[in-house]
Image (tube, coloured by chain):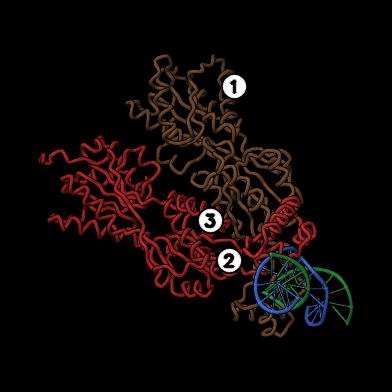
Chain colours: A red, B brown, C blue, D green
Amino acid sequence: MAKIQKVAELAGVSTATVSRALAGKSSVSPATRTKVEEAANELGYVVSAAASSLASGKTRNVGVILPLLDSWFFMAVLKGAQRLLEDAGYDITLYHLPPAGELGAGDASKQRRRRLFDEFLRRQRVDAFIAVNLELDDEERALLSQLRRPLVGLGGVLPGLHTVTLDDKAVAHLATDHLLSLGHTEIAHITGDPDFERDFQVPTTRRRAYEASITNAGITRNPLLVRTADFTIEGGYNATKQLLGDPRIHPTAIFAASDEMAIGAILAARDLGKDVPRDISVIGIDGHDLADFFGLTTIDQFPELQGRQVAQLILDELAGQGVEPIAEELPHELVVRRSTAAPLDAPTR
Amino acid sequence: MAKIQKVAELAGVSTATVSRALAGKSSVSPATRTKVEEAANELGYVVSAAASSLASGKTRNVGVILPLLDSWFFMAVLKGAQRLLEDAGYDITLYHLPPAGELGAGDASKQRRRRLFDEFLRRQRVDAFIAVNLELDDEERALLSQLRRPLVGLGGVLPGLHTVTLDDKAVAHLATDHLLSLGHTEIAHITGDPDFERDFQVPTTRRRAYEASITNAGITRNPLLVRTADFTIEGGYNATKQLLGDPRIHPTAIFAASDEMAIGAILAARDLGKDVPRDISVIGIDGHDLADFFGLTTIDQFPELQGRQVAQLILDELAGQGVEPIAEELPHELVVRRSTAAPLDAPTR
DNA sequence: CTGAAAGCGCTAACAA
DNA sequence: TTGTTAGCGCTTTCAG
């Protein structure tokens, strides 16, 4: 590993000039810059991250805090963010912060969380943080503020912190209204488990909007039409079996709070001998990779784009583009495929 | 951010002692150690990563290089590795290195790859690397060696580098032999796309073992029984439709080179009105989260465990446990579920 | 077991 | 535009 001194000697300039030239500062003559670049190239010189960080206070590294590492959604977000940050020359340091209220979160899990805040996040290894679906208590929020590093939250709400979120209310309204407009009147909803609620308000928000849409349409709500699941295909499958097996209800459509649960719903309907969408329509939320394959109508929330967007915000802040508004909104779009249609008994318009 | 000097003052010792005490070195008296720890605690002191790295040459950071960020398998590996590294106090820096030969890998992609090797990996930001399914050309391998950092490869083979891999040959033999032992004689195989082959020899290895098992059983191989797909559910679905629709062949079992393709096979069979396993048996490889839900018989390769294992190797090397053998082997296990059974026409034993 | 002091490799004033 | 110089905050000899 060649050091800056060698490059300076080879280029016949001072180390300060090498530093400036390689950092792309403007105050270097083109000729010198070329000389330096050639020398650096020849020696295979790359600046030492530690030395540069210590001297400049900048790490060229962004921390990304994710609640789950094995979820399709978060990985899509990560992928989007990664690309932009890489292009900007930033490394990514990954932090795994499972939801605090997670079922079965024992002492070990709490200690891990604690240690992340007390030790890992405080080593000044990164210039900024991207926090995805992060739910914090007051103390944790205080700790984060003390870090004095830009932080942008994606999804969820961090009071007092810069956050971009999907308008879950609008999304759920759109999904429900899509089914209503097709003529459905008995619409079931698969929402998140109570355990999930503690950490993401998302399921509740979506459920409320669903209920509001139903009520607005002049339809009496039936609690039997709402089932909980754990956001997985299997969860959606089981919930749908309950829904379609209950003799007291006869839903002609299911609105699932995620695409994976919606896919589970489609599979359950099939296993029960019901045709989708003839016997039962299904709509999800996400824009999952598999949605197209299953012909699933969904509200796409462009997770990869979300990652790109939040990365761009961070890059802007790091470039000193001033503080952005405290809450921005992410785009979404209804994508109609073959899993939704008018109910059989619908009046032809 | 308190600095070491403050802690030293509060504890009434020198900065050198603080450094030693906090690093857990043995040459500090218990009393002093306690004093220092209390002082550090009170001030909320955490060592600065940059300063510590520069002075000691150690970063407490491991680089993980992944070919894909949106694949279930690699994320499972990452999850396993993450946990161990976190517990050992290491951060993870994530590098995304798409396969060089990827279809449509344009100039931009090549430049990204180049830059990763020339710039990102050379900043000395990490103490060691974990490289998952990494395929390198000679130049790249030379560059990696120049980094003089421990590197353990997981999957694939890096000549001259420490690598742990699954015995793909044994795995594919096991899968095929499972079907043979059930009495199947016309066994189809879904392998990887030619484009995939360039980067992972995995599909080829598995296909060869499949062919060998068939031949060993005294059965004449039929090229029509082998189809390629892209390792996705959709790919497996399409391949299976071809397989089951071809009037020249009558497979009673399908061995897919991945669980996702196997799940696609199950779905395709269903859509064609075939019962699994009555009309057609299906076996995959991986141990996918969804395998249980779909009742898929598979060869589990415990991806999360792979992550843990490779992380442990890296930690051992960093702890100076000496160099390990150049090639180790990962465990695998046949998990029989309901997707495989004897063919209808099989003689009862 | 502890302290003093010399860097680790680079950047950022400040001068020139 | 370029060079000189003083650190950045910590670890690690080397003494004691």
Residue drawn 68% across and 39% down? B158
Instruction: Give the distance between the C-alpha atoms of the residues marked 1 and 3, in whole angstroms.
Output: 46 Å
Quarter of the image for residue B318 reads: bottom right
- The quadrant the N terminus of chain B occupies is bottom right
- Say whether residue B30 is visible: no
Badge 1: residue crowd in 10 Å (few <14, some 14–19, many ≥20): some
Residue drawn 63% across and 43% down? B154
Badge 3: residue crowd in 10 Å (few <14, some 14–19, many ≥20): many
> In the depicted view, which residue is nearer to us: A251 or A170?
A170
Position in image of residue A178 (x %, y %) = 22, 48
Q: Chain of mark 1?
A: B
Q: Chain of mark 3?
A: A
* Closer mark to the observer between disc 1 and disc 3: 3
Classify A126 as above or below A87. below
Q: Which residue is mark 2?
A: A120
Position in image of residue B260 (x %, y %) = 46, 37
Residue drawn 62% across and 73% down? B46
Q: Which residue is mark 1?
A: B212
Local SS, label 1? helix
Q: Which disc number belongs to residue A85?
A: 3
Badge 2: residue crowd in 10 Å (few <14, some 14–19, many ≥20): some
Callout 1 amino acid: Ala
Q: Is residue A340 left or right of residue B132?
A: left
> In the depicted view, which residue is nearer to us: B250 or B3?
B3
Local SS, label 3? helix
Classify D11 as above or below B71. below
Q: Is residue B224 left or right of residue D1?
A: left
Instruction: Give the distance between the C-alpha atoms of the residues marked 2 and 1, in whole angstroms.
Output: 51 Å
